[in-house]
Amino acid sequence: MSEATVTIRMYNPGFGDCFLVTVADDGATWRMLVDCGVHSHGRARVGDVPRKIGDVVDAVIGQLTAESADGMPRIDVVAATHRHSDHVSGFADDAWAAVEVGQVWVPFVEDERDPDAIGLRQGLTAAATALQGLVEQAAAGRPVESLGRSMALAMDFAVNSGPNLAAATRLVDGGFKGGADHHDVRFLPRREAAANRVELPVEGAVVHVLGPSRDPEDLKRMDPPAAVHWLEEAAAENGRDDEFDIFDRMYEVPRDEVSARIPIQLVRARNAMRLGGLALDEEALLRAASVLERSVNNTSLFFVLDVRGTRFVFVGDSQQGAWEHVLGDPESRALVTGAAFYKVGHHGSHNATPKPVAHELVHAGGVAMVPVGTVKAWQDSIPKSEILEALHESGANVIRADDPATGAAAVGGDGDLDVEVGPDGLWSEVRFRVP
Amino acid sequence: MLSNHNVPAVQAPDRRLLRAFAFDPMSSRLSGQFLTVDIPFETGLRPGPDGELVQVVDYDATRRRWYHPVDLDDPPVLAQDGLRPSESDPRSHQQIVYAITMSVIERFERFTGRRFRWRGDDRLRLVPHAFYGRNAYFDPERRAVLFGYYRADDSDSQASLPHQLMFTCLSVDIIAHEVTHAIVHRLRPMFTIATNSDVFAFHEAFADLVALFHHFLFTDIVEDFVAGSRSELADAAALLSLADEFGRSTGRGGPLRSAVGSAPDPADFQAAREPHRRGAIFVAAVFDAYLATYRSRIADLRRLATGGSGVLADGELSPDLVRRIAAEAVKNADRILGMVVRGFDYLPAVDVTFGDVVRAVITADRDLFPDDSIHLRGHLVEALRRRGIFPPGVVSLADQALLWRSPTAPLSLTTGEATVDLGQLILDSTIKLDPSASSVTAAGNAAQARSRAVYAQTVNWAKAHAVELGLDPDAGRIRVLGMHVGFQIGADGQPHPRIFIQIVQRREDLESGSDRDTRTRIHAACTVIANVDGRVAWLVPKPLPFTKPEALAKLSEPLAVHGREQHAAGVARFAEIREWFGEVEDGDPLAIWLDEPAVGRLTFASLHAPEEG
């Protein structure tokens, strides 16, 4: 059999993921796009101008067109790992209507007919909507930033987790060339194990879909029912008429009689406690919002591309919990450790790459790619330096989307690896040769 | 006050009786029972109620309005043991939070043998309708217990009407639990820094324990349960069913209810990581000890009642028997809870573990009851062992192996290098014991100045004996966090005065993070327990690595060996703290997004919040 190549091109939209994967040998070529999105706060800059996600979409489609024999852009698989904006916002772009797509892979959570998923998906959407409503109510027309950092962050989570309708419609309802009949939507993983091992047209190439988990315990962890409940309840109560009474009016002190009726030391105690902030508990809101954010991350498609024993690991934004499911199974664990390539989870944040296995994930001389654009507010924690150091120490070449030149220089002409960087740092690419 | 009405004046009573739900509106409705809470009569209690220790502030932050404060000294209120509890009258809510809080505080005072005061003589604020929300928590920053109210939904089986309002401030269990958090915080302020998985678990367990045993304070309620249980007395079904009421109507205490009375398995405790679960196992062990004690204490009554057969005759229990059995149940609940609470003063000042709690309780109890004549201590150690709770590394569960450590060489506060004038401390503590001497007149400015001088002397004493205390003579500032005299009653019926000192040393050199105000603080500490003549009886050190361990070699032989042991223990403890911080960081969904350490986000509010459940 002829030598195969695996080419992985990481685009740099900013704080977001977009990977074009090409597996080829003399007999066949197979292409897959993994995610295409950017976070609203984290667009990459070209000089002083923020890069638009549309530019990345155009570049991807341009590449597909250039590689196509008849000049028609074509791709075998589009995988959207999870519904967060920083992974799917690009699919809202109408340019995709011209692209011929073979299959769309999305997590089973998005399947409207999957009984495991219905409650979970509705819960996530309801929580995101309630959260957004609560923050907007608190802002009362002012910019959300004026509420302070916690609320701005909670709003980010809400928007990121909320329904990305245009993108979702294109992915699931058939927004690529030819419409719904033309491409096949796969909700993964399936219940039957055999369906989660997908043979590719290139000889000896296969994809193993390992997550998200369908284990009821794990599903419970992805679903934040109590948080949803709490958020919806709070939103309902906040929206209620303020004049609604919990006690008969005679027990209330009329506003103009407070100074006469309430002893001054009690008023002072009230003031000292700053009780105003309790009406909307910002800490609790942010906590619920972050639980929601993590829950959605843990719905990520988690898969391994295996080309004749050389393995390429894509984890979406799986965080603690989702990883445990994979590492807990010896066969899955063997697939994700000692790989040639690792798409660093969740932009390199600390609990998206479990520290105990960070040293084992990539074999010496392999590659770890970090899709990250620094966002000032998170610059100390994302990416987490300990994670990148652990990968580096294990002998992996670490390439950051926002600093492709340094990554490329480090790899150099390392044996079987070729590295290339696109104009203006738009992408960085590694090519592996597999005998 | 009241004495204005009569000439000559009638003296104010010692006690005030106030009614509360037993133990919340739902169970009260079913049983038709109210509690009559018997608390000290505070003269000069202002509307609120606003007293010397607590202040009820009935302001609703969600609806931004005040509710009229209750005046408990109003003659119609006084004449009927307080207002009749009612869900629709907020003043009875104010009365209930005040009454239960005062009764919990009084119980603490009785057990610890000293007057309870909040730090700086401030008052604890109770806000019965603080916000809309299914939560109630102690907020150390606001020095307040904040009670939420919420609308029942379909999952609230206890609500009698759909969508009725539920008030957390009407649950005796919730009030007792939250107030205990406040008391624990007063006695051990550093226990809000979660340096291991047990620190918050202990806070929770202790609050649950006090609240659970509060069910056994009311003789008439216990009598009802004993009379109603009609089963074999030895299986203590009455006590278990009374315990099973705990938190039931409010959706709280689930882990506790399932743990109490369950079959013990030592592996459970080792496996449990979640604070509520670990705490529940500890409480269950204490409850086991209570049941064992109760059974042995009613054995004679059982023999009398059954003519020695152990089998009761058909029909109702004799009211005399019910009274005697209930009295034993109440008395032994008090004994067991008292034993655990007395151990409080023997706890380390930071970084507590359940193993430390076992040692503290055993050491305190042995100090007061060397013979353990009714086998209380024996029952507790056995119950804890059966649930897998004992200090790591102990070779035996005999008292000797579980006691705290005595100083390596005789150590005294009043002789040697730097001495402390204990006389003033003892005098001031004694004056405070007199209930008629209010804290202001008894202490006064002169007393405050005296107390500052004693603190300064104690700091010097601690510096002079740093290595013995497990503190680093070359690192951060050493300070005295608290110092008091306790007059606990021993087996001989006499008060046994003891001096308790908490000494801490912040080690900024071991902390990580750029901002010294927001990063997680790391402390070495030592609790010193001394006799009133100054002789140190026990030391409870929490060491950290020494900055100059090589300097220990210059010390005299026994101290050098001791110093090396403290250093080694400090290295191990510090490694465990780091590992735990990492674990918390990994589990916290916000850790990615915020710089502040995740451990700092563990708060009472977050522990009690329903969304994490």
Image (tube, grey):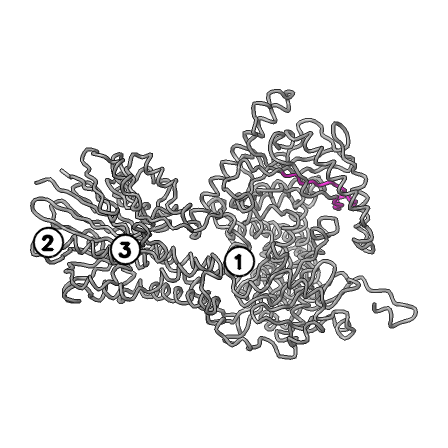
Instruction: For label 1, count other residues whose C-alpha is less than 10 Å away and answer few (under 14), some (14-19) or many (20+).
Output: some
Where residue B69 appears, x then y in whole percent? 69, 70
Could you confirm whether marks 2 and 3 are on the same chain?
yes
- The residue singled out by tag 1 in the image is B608
Location of residue B229 in the rendering, given as x and y in whole percent from the top left corner: 60, 64
Task: Give the number of the mark in front: 2 or 3.
Answer: 2
Instruction: Report the residue marked by disc 3.
Output: A81
Badge 1 and badge 2 both on one subunit? no
- Residue A252 among those drawn in magenta: no
Q: Marks 1 and 3: which is nearer the front?
A: 3
B578 relative position to A275: left or right: left
Report the side of A169 relative to B136 (left or right): left
In this picture, is B168 found above or below B377?
A: below
Gap between marks 1 and 3, in whole Å? 34 Å
The N terminus of chain A, quarter of image:
top left
The span from disc 1 to disc 2 (Cα, nearest Å) is 59 Å
Q: Amino acid at mark 1?
A: His
Q: Amino acid at mark 2?
A: Ser
Judged from this view, the residue extending furthest toward the right is B8
Q: Give x and y (percent) for residue B61.
A: 58, 67
As rendered, which of B243 and A303 lies closer to the eye? A303
Residue at screen point 8% across, 40% down: A2
State which chain disc 2 sits on: A
Q: Chain of mark 1?
A: B
Label 1 residue SS:
helix
Residue at 16% from the left image edge and 59% from the top image edge: A101
Q: Which residue is mark 2?
A: A68
Q: Which residues are magenta?
A: B485-504
Residue nearest the observer in this picture, B373 or B278? B278
Mark 3 or mark 2, which is nearer the start of the sequence? 2
Q: Report the side of B3 relative to A49 (left or right).
A: right
Mark 1 vs mark 2: in front: 2
